[in-house]
Image: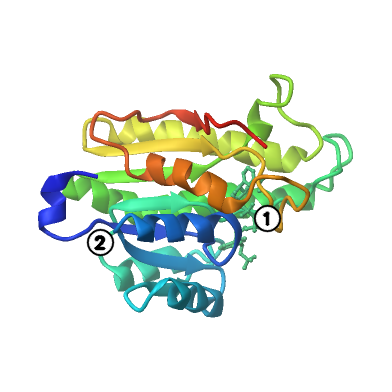
Amino acid sequence: MDDAHAAGGPRTALITGAGRGIGRAVAAELHRRGLRLVVTARTAGDARETAARLGPDVAGHGLDVTDPDAPKRVAADAGPVDVLVCNAGVLLDAGTDPLSVPVDLVDETLRVNLLGTWRVAQAFVPGMVERGWGRVVIISSGTTAEFGGRLFGGAPGYSISKSALNGLASLLAAQTEGTGVLVNAVNPGRVRTRMMPGQRRMPEDVAPFIADAATLPADGPTGGFLTDKRGPG
Ligand SMILES: NC(=O)c1ccc[n+]([C@@H]2O[C@H](COP(=O)([O-])OP(=O)(O)OC[C@H]3O[C@@H](n4cnc5c(N)ncnc54)[C@H](OP(=O)(O)O)[C@@H]3O)[C@@H](O)[C@H]2O)c1
């Protein structure tokens, strides 16, 4: 994080889907690093509970990323956001395959993972561009390439949604190039959460990697697909 801004107060980070799992751990890690936090969750109750756990200085806002009005409403309430972690996501079609997955499940997956993230980015990234500084982290997945060098077919809607998010990160990075805004997709590897209960690594194990991507120096990468070098558990 740049020292110049530290003199004028900490940067502000907003995390989506921070009521549990990886999002909550990333919020805690960024709070530990001294950022001002705006914690959001699908329900206002979860957002407030997570915020209260982190400290009295932390704001909590309900933000259902499928609600077309919610991101702009939160943006108006929360004030300027410098660091955006797009973490909210669903895995609805595990155990299916591309030929038989109910397309309604794919539709719902894309509505949350892709369109929800896109909508949130549209609410917060223009302000970063105007202010000349921003960091955006989009939580992608190894299902986009990691399993045998091809998309993982055992959760096809999810894999497509996360591949599309890599594309969104690339588009946003190109659009913001040279403005002081860095946009990257990250692959946290497999982590034990409600989504992936059988894994070894805990959200706290990957939170520093995601927090690093959210606090990159000015010469850090943009448009990248960053993988936790400590490897998937
Ligand atoms: N765990 C892994 O191994 C793994 C690996 C690669 C990538 N990821 C990604 O990491 C991110 C976090 O997942 P997780 O593993 O921490 O799973 P999780 O514990 O199930 O957390 C998912 C979070 O997303 C929120 N969410 C779902 N729909 C939402 C909506 N419409 N609006 C706002 N928030 C919404 C959930 O809120 P509610 O609880 O209210 O539904 C929850 O807080 C996801 O993008 C996931 O795809 C996870």
Front residue of 147 and 71: 147
Mark on residue 193? 1
Q: Amino acid at mark 2?
A: Pro
- Foreground mark, 1 or 2? 1
- SS assignment at label 1: loop
x, y percentage for residue 33? 33, 54
Dividing the image into four quarters, tell me where ligand 1 lies.
bottom right
Crowdedness of circle 1 by 10 Å Cα count: few (<14), some, many (20+)? some
198 lies left or right of 51: right
For residue 3, above or below residue 54:
above
Give the residue displayed 70% in from the left and 43% down from the top: 158
Front residue of 67 and 9: 9
- SS assignment at label 2: loop
Crowdedness of circle 2 by 10 Å Cα count: few (<14), some, many (20+)? some
Q: Tell me the quadrant of the picture where the N terminus can be found.
A: top left
Q: Amino acid at mark 1?
A: Thr
For residue 177, above or below residue 36:
above
x, y percentage for residue 168? 48, 37
Mark with earlier residue (1, 2)? 2
| Residue, disc 2 | 80
Give the residue displayed 44% in from the left and 28% down from the top: 224
Q: Is mark 1 within 8 Å of ligand 1?
A: yes
142 lies left or right of 128: right
Q: CA distance from mark 1 to mark 2?
A: 30 Å
For residue 122, above or below residue 179:
below
